Amino acid sequence: MARHDRDMPCRIAQRVGILRQGGMPPRPHRGGAWTAFGKSISGKMKAGCVAGLLGLAAGAVQAQTVEFHLDLDTGGHRAVIRDVVASADGAVVVSASDDKTVRIWNGGTGESTAVLRGQMGPGGEGVVNAVALSADAGAVAVGGYFAGHQAAQGPFGDVRIFDVQSGAIRSVLRGHELVVETLAYDAGRDELAVSGQGGQVHRWAAPFSDAPQALPVLDTQSWRVSRVDYALNGQQLIVATYDYGLRIWDLDNGTEIAAPDAEALWDTPLVALAVSADGALFALADDQGRVTVREAATGAVIAALPQRPFRVDALGFSGDRLVLSCGYRCGDSYGSETWDWATGTMLTEYRAQDGGVHALAILPEGRVVTAGGRLNRLDMWDVSTGQAMRQMGGISAPVAAVGLSAMADRIGWGADDPCPTQAICPTRMGELTQEMELPTAERAFEKPGPRGAARLGRAVTALPGLEVKLDSEPGTGFDGSRLRIGDAAVIKGGDSGYYHSAYSFVPGLDRVISGGGNGILLDYGLDGSIAGEFVGHTGEILALAVAPRAERLLSGAADQTVKLWNLKTHELLATLFFAGDDWIIWTPQGYFYSSPNGDRLVGWRINQGQDQAARYVTARQLRQHLHSPEIVRRAIIGGSARAAAQELRGRDNELEELLTRKPPAFEIRMIDGDAPEGQALIEVTGASLEEVESWGYSVLVNDRRVRPARMGGVDGRLVYAVPLEVGENRITVAGRDDFGYVTERSAVALSKKRDTPEKRGKLYVAVVGVNTYPNLPEACGGKACDLAYPVADALEFLNVVKQRSAPLYTGMETLVMVSGDALAADAPRQQALSLFMEPGAVLEPDARTVSGELVDFLARPGPEDTTVIFVAGHGMNLEEQYYLLPSDAQKRGDRWRTSSLVDWSVIQEEISFAQGRRILVLDTCHAANAFNAKLEKEAADARVIVFSATAANNTAGERPDLGHGIFTYAMLEGLRGAAARAGEGVRLLGLADYVYHEVVRLSRNKQEPFYHISQSANFLVAQ
């Protein structure tokens, strides 16, 4: 795609300079593009041109210091994978990506077991181009662009040696000045070769040891080396270049070997190289699809494959077969081919990757891993059959389509590529498959779901009476680099995204928004002038939608995120990420709203310096401070994330302060040993006893909070016994420091049926019912806040649980707090209640009583016990907090007296720390907008089973003919047996399903209950 310019040497040097700063020009997301260079120029001219360009770059952009960077962790790569290597036995696979991470994979299971992170910054800083694995698979050499963004001074090509187990940087190999693009390690010789831009090959002996030794540098006289590899048992080094052909060195005597066709290759960009397992052969591919197999000793061609109609970016020998992969110009033939190179016969094809493949690694037993496609995935497949064996990647995909309603209160998105055989197609709209209602002043968030019938606007790619044409500006090297608008043109270059991958006019305004590579999204006037920039994406912009009346812009990108912007101010309001049932929405200030597990997907990489591994902190670890659906809501409604943070927290830099602290650091693993029956032993490593005890750690086994028993060990290796349930047990240890930082580690243990009966434990039940609010005669829409049925709901719930659930336990303890006047007027319920408790033990549900008694009650259960909390009455949201309205709730004018309310966050924390299984039943959302997403998330984090009368944006109803709130009535009927299966009683999942459908039916679709069940067995709740 790029022009092969061999007549302007300084222009070539400038291209190299651009590569130095940004890693590489971006390959368009659907297939990619790269720049080819001509014949080598003199070293003097090269030095002068590069120095001149560096001076220009330094003057154009002022250096910035950036310490923290958002980083999604989806379980796989989110950008082009540049390199893949594997251990000799195939047990460990290592991949390097433009997403600035190195991933370690288990070759047997396909699981990503570790992520190596170094310092990163804007632009190309931190891009990883190449990796090499030590013989024992315990260390990884990593090369790329390791200097400040657009830095005027190097070095740029230091090689970081990472320890695989700890993720720490063991050492740094210094000497390669410019960007590293290729590494090769020979275990027999114990030598590492490093090269890339600048054309020099640096080598180190014993590179993974404590004392690596630099060896003499080899100069290829080229501008840019594409690949290096060892051959003939490490005796020879093969070097492929983009601009000076093939170079071969005999490392034992230091002489250079000229291939018979060496001069003919000077003008041929060589892009791929592979050496056979015995080192006797190597394969070479140029940018025009020509592939040759050569003798390693001489470089002579011994076989040539039929010219491929695409650029071959990766090669590998598997026995007597040669595997090659298409990286560019693939058309509709993305994937890889296996050839009998000796006869020139194609044997198999692998077409499961729908995009360019830029790297591969050969594994034992006829397996190969190819890396690429739209999903930036690693596919393991059988070379002899072409059959897929395993796919290794993340849980999401690039966002190829977005839609936005006229009032910006609903968004849609989709992942399917609308033009898989084209590099870009900005006028073709992809399918919207999912949607989500955004909050308004009258409405809270809704959960994402399948696309509905509501109208959503898409990109506006044409205007009446205005000629619009997308073509290429000569010399740019990219299709779609020029957007003609009447007599004007918007031309993309290296600093503006290279090409128009997505654009949209703004109806009613003389503006066009255009996105391109590297996440660059610009606001232009129709005359081509830049009016502003939307800063936030890191991958190619794939889709846009505008809502001019609402002053909003929506974008989707190859970085797998959707972003909502203020169209007028260019401020980023929120970023949205969706992956199956998990999702998260966050503001630039770090505040977020997510599904129960969505906060595990987002974190921040915290730079520690170029020679140190970066720290990584997840949003989940900071959830006590940053989980704020209300700030996210206000940012979207008000059009400013900064203002929303200032309004509720008084500042907008809380994240920076949080990330300066370090969270608790430890790991856990299951160990063998003499554990008591029904228990397992876990070892907590990396922390002292004093640290563990100071963290206030908690241990969850499935949905039960348990007390671990100390069984010995020493500081740094502490051993605990943990009680198990029959079957699979997910053990989660959480350490929380005084600052509220949380670190969680999990392991899985299996437990067989025991010889002794399993302990059943005791049932603890607390009920709260508030009918009357004497201090609130006009507080609910100008009317009294009194309700008819909460006391009846609470007492009947207690009665049914006593009859149907209590027999499943060794005993039952109760706490009853209901409105006394309502109870006094209900003689039958007084009589029923007196059968198992003294009437004087019933407490009035005022603020002090509810808060104090519930806290004390929740401290009583043990690990085998089950606690049920039932609350019926009014609940409400004030700013970020959820409050229960007790019987003595008060207002002063238009403001609530919060001291007269029950702060549910206090109760929620006590529920989280209560021992055993916890069940929360809430019939409290009797007013509009009373659903609290924060409460929902915090309960889920603590693995509390939650049944709530409503989901977002509906209210809990009461029906006189039922004598109860609709939700409570459905719960009662379900527990009485309506949710039972024949001969089994009522189980948890059956009750949840019954209550959901019954509430929807009884409310005539006006009320939708909510429940959350996490890591819980489908246990018997009633008989």
Image (cartoon, grey):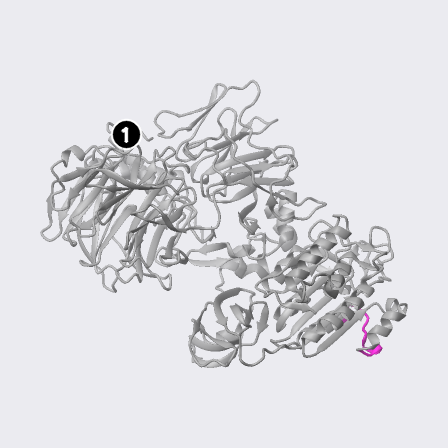
- Disc 1 target residue: 4
Element carrying mark 1: loop
Q: Residue at image x 80%, y 53%?
A: 894
Q: Is residue 21 left or right of residue 825?
A: left
Q: Amino acid at mark 1?
A: His
Question: Where residue 436 sits in the image (x, y, percent)?
Answer: 61, 44
* In-front residue for pair 981/974: 981
Question: Where residue 45 sits in the image (x, y, percent)?
Answer: 22, 35
> As displayed, is residue 726 above or below residue 630?
below
Where the N terminus falls, by quadrant?
top left
Q: Is residue 209 left or right of residue 529?
A: left
Q: Residue at image x 48%, y 67%?
A: 748
* In-front residue for pair 38/325: 325
Question: Most extreme residue toward the front, as rendered?
Answer: 982
| Number of numbered discs | 1
Residue 468 seen in the figure: yes
State yes or no: residue 845 in magenta: yes
State yes or no: residue 249 in magenta: no
Residue 979 picture quarter: bottom right
Residue 733 seen in the figure: no
Range of residues picked out in magenta: 837-849
Q: Is residue 305 left or right of residue 107?
A: left
> As displayed, is residue 808 above or below residue 656?
below
